Amino acid sequence: MTHVVTDSCVRCKYTDCVDVCPVDCFHEGPLYLVIDPDECIDCAVCIPECPVEAIYADADLPAAFAPFVELNAARAKEWPVINKRKDALPDADRWKDAKNKLAGEEP
């Protein structure tokens, strides 16, 4: 089992989860984070740290977020590891409650 970052992270990129992760499984893209399924140790400490509830265990993933399993795996191979907390994106508060953010809809 692994954990998956979903749509809620997009355009927010809160990094509270990175601070508590005991391994280097988070990778940073320009608009959101992903989890490398090969590095995640399924400890689940990241889940309660996410202020937008973007992280799920893959077994608990809502069906609407199924494409994020493959997306996390693919982007983790392309994007650099992030292992230190950073500020969220400047307009994160504006986007945090928006839906379908990967499609680029304005909130």
Image: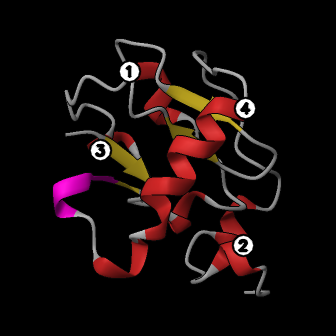
Q: Of marks 3 and 4, which one's residue comes earlier in the chain? A: 3
Give the left or right position of residue 75, taking residue 62 as reference: right
Mark 4 Cα within 10 Å, few/some/many (few <14, many 20+)?
some
Distance CA(mark 3)–CA(mark 4)? 21 Å
Picture disc at residue 47: 3
**Residue that carries the numbered disc 2 in the rendered image:** 94
Give neighbour class at mark 3: few <14, some 14-19, many 20+ (Cα, 10 Å).
Answer: many
Nearer the observer: mark 3 or 4; the answer is: 4
Q: Mark 3 against mark 2, which lies toward the viewer? A: 3
- What residue type is disc 4 on? Trp
Residues at badges 3 and 2 in contact (C-beta under 8 Å)? no
Magenta part, dominant SS = helix
Q: Is residue 84 magenta?
A: no
* Within-10-Å neighbours for mark 2: few <14, some 14–19, many 20+: few
Q: Residue at 41%, 72% (x, y): give it.
A: 65
The label shown at residue 79 is 4
**Residue on which disc 1 sits:** 21
The magenta-colored residue range is 56-60
Against 59, residue 13 (above or below) is above
Secondary structure beneath label 3: helix
First in sequence: mark 4 vs mark 1: 1
Seen at 39% across and 49% down, the residue is 4
Distance between the Cα atoms at labels 3 and 1? 10 Å
Of the residues shown, which amino acid type is indicated by label 2?
Answer: Arg
Under circle 2, the secondary element is helix
Residue in the foreground of this view, choosing between 23 and 12:
23
The residues tagged by marks 3 and 2 sit, at their Cα atoms, a distance apart of 22 Å
Q: Which of marks 1 and 2 is nearer the N terminus?
A: 1
- Are the two marked residues, 4 and 2, in contact with CB atoms closer than 8 angstroms? no
Tell me the CA gap for discs 1 and 2: 26 Å
Q: Which amino acid does label 1 sit on?
A: Cys
Q: In which quarter of the image is residue 20?
A: top left
